[in-house]
Image: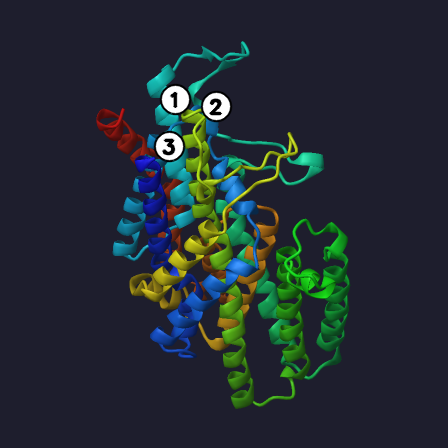
Amino acid sequence: MTLLIIIIVLALIFDYINGFHDAANAIATVVATKVLTPFQAVLWAAFFNFLAYWVFGFGVADTVAKTAHTMEINLVVILAGVIAAICWNLLTWWLGIPSSSSHTLIGGFAGAAVAHAIAVHGFSGYVDADGTTHYWYQIVSWYKAGKDGGMPSGVLIIIAFIVLAPLLGALASYLISIWLLNASRKIIGPKIFTVALMIGTVWLVSSLMVPYSAIDKPRFDSHFWSVAFDPHNIKWFLVAFIILTVSAFCLIFSSLNLHQADAALKKMQLLSSAAFSLGHGGNDSQKVMGIIAAAVAVYINTNPGVHMDSWLDVVLPNDDLGIKGVMPGWIPLACYSAIAAGTLSGGWKIVKTMGSKITKVTSFEGVAAETAGALTLYFTEHLKIPVSTTHTITGSIIGVGLTKRVSAVRWGVTVSLIWAWILTIPISALLAGLVYFILSVFIG
C-alpha cells in the first residue's frame, strides 16, 4: 500500500508539473498580444483548467490506463514510468522546449512495462496459463481495433497523432484565418457561408445531444438540467458556442473599422484562450487519472483478496465484458486541482517560445490559433485519444502563420520543436526502462 500511495502522490506532482510546463499552450498568445498580463493570463487559464472537471468524461483516462496490460505488470513499472516522465518534463521545461507531457507519460509507462517484460521473461516467448505464447513486446497495447467500427486505440494511434494533431490544428487554424480574412471584406459571399455554417452547426450539435433516457447517472432531478449538464452534451454545447460566436463576429466584421475590429478580437481572445484551457485541463488531467487507475488495478491484481477502502475503489472499464468503469470522485478532483495549481505557477520560458519564436502573433492570429486548438482537443477527446496540447497549439500557430506567407513561420525553431516531439516517446521509454532496472534492485 505504501508504494501505491507514493505513486499517487508522484502522479499528482507530475500533474502539477504538467500544469506549469504546458501553461504556455493556453496563455502564450494572450500574453504576446498583451490582451492579459502574464499574471492575469495564468489565473484565467488555471480557472478553466479546473472548470474542465465538470465538462469532460474519463475516456482519455481509460485509454492511458490501458497503455500496458495491467495483469502483467507490477507497481514498480508505474513508479518508474512516472519518475521518468517527471525527469523529462523538468528537463524540457528548463531548456524552454514545449515537448508533450502526454507523450512523456505514455512513453514512460510503455518503456517501463517493456523493461519489466524483458526482466521477467527475457527476449524469448513464454506460455501463459491458457497455453498462448506471448513475447516481451506484447505487454504494451500497441493497437486495438475499435468496437463496432469505432476509433481504434493503442500506443500506435497515440504515436500517429504526434503528426495528426498538429496537422489538424494547422489545417483548422488556416481555414479559420481564411474565413475571418474573407469576412472582413464587404462582399456577400462570406456572409452567406457564415449563415450556412451557423445553421449546420446548430443542426449537427442538436443531433449529437444525449437525451435524458440515455444518461446513466443524471446529475439533477430535473430532466432539463441533467441533459444540459451532461459532460457529453456540455462539450458539444461549447463547440456550438465557439463556432456561433466566431460566426456572429464574422457577420459584422466588415462593418468595423480597424480599431473596433482589434478591440473585438482582443475580447474574443479571452473566449478562445478559455476554450483552449478547458480542453487542456480535460485532456491532460485525464492522463494522470489513467495512471492512478492503472496503479490501483495493478495493486489489486498483485494482492489477490485484498480489501480496498472505498476511497480507492477503482474499476477499469471493459467493453468486451460489459464492465463499466468506477472512479472515486477525489481522483478527478485532485488531478484537476493539481494541473490548475501548476498552471498558476507559470512556465515563462516556454511562453516565450510559443508566443514569439514560431511566428509573430496578433489578436487575429491568436483567436484563430486558440479556436482551432480548442476544437481539435474537443474532437480528439471525444474519440478518447490522448493527444498533446503542445503539439496541437503549435500546429495551430503555424497554420495562422501560413496565411501570411510561408516565410512568416520561423522554420528553424519549428524543426527543432518537431525533433523534440519525435524523440519524446523513445527517450522517455528508455529513461523509464533504466529507472525500472534501478528500482528493481531496491524494491522486490
- Helix, strand or loop at mark 2: helix
Q: CA distance from mark 3 to mark 2?
A: 12 Å
Residue type of the residue flagged with mark 3: Gly
Please say whether residue 160 is visible from this viewpoint. no
- Kindly indicate the quadrant of the structure image that contains residue 113: top left
Measured from the top left, where is residue 53 in percent x and y?
51, 58
76 displayed left or right of 364: left
Q: CA distance from mark 1 to mark 3?
A: 10 Å
User: Going from the N terminus, do you reach mark 1 or mark 2 first?
Assistant: 1
Q: In the image shown, does 125 or 177 lie closer to the viewer?
A: 125
- Sequence-wise, the earlier of marks 3 and 2 is 3
Q: CA distance from mark 1 to mark 2?
A: 9 Å
Q: Which quadrant of the figure contains the C terminus? A: top left
Can you say whether 186 is above or below 3 in the image? below
Please name the amino acid that badge 2 sits on.
Gln
The residue at the point 64 percent across, 70 percent down is 241
- Crowd tier of the residue under label 2, counting other residues whose Cα lies within 10 Å: few below 14, some 14–19, many 20 or above: few
Residue occupying the point 41% across, 31% down: 299
Residue extending furthest toward the left: 442
Residue lying at 36% horizontally and 32% vertically, measured from the top left? 75
Q: Are marks 1 and 2 in contact (CB under 8 Å)?
A: yes
Tell me where residue 213 appears, x and y as whole percent: 76, 52
The kind of residue on which mark 1 rests is Ala
Q: Which residue does the numbered mark 1 point to in the structure image?
A: 117
Q: Nearer the viewer, residue 203 or 220?
A: 220
| Residue 107: percent from left, percent from top | 40, 38
Residue 9 visible in image: yes
Which residue is under mark 3? 111
- 442 sits left or right of 250 in the view: left
In this rendering, the answer to whether 196 lies above or below 306 is below
Query: Which residue is under mark 2?
Result: 138
Where disc 1 sits, the SS reads: helix
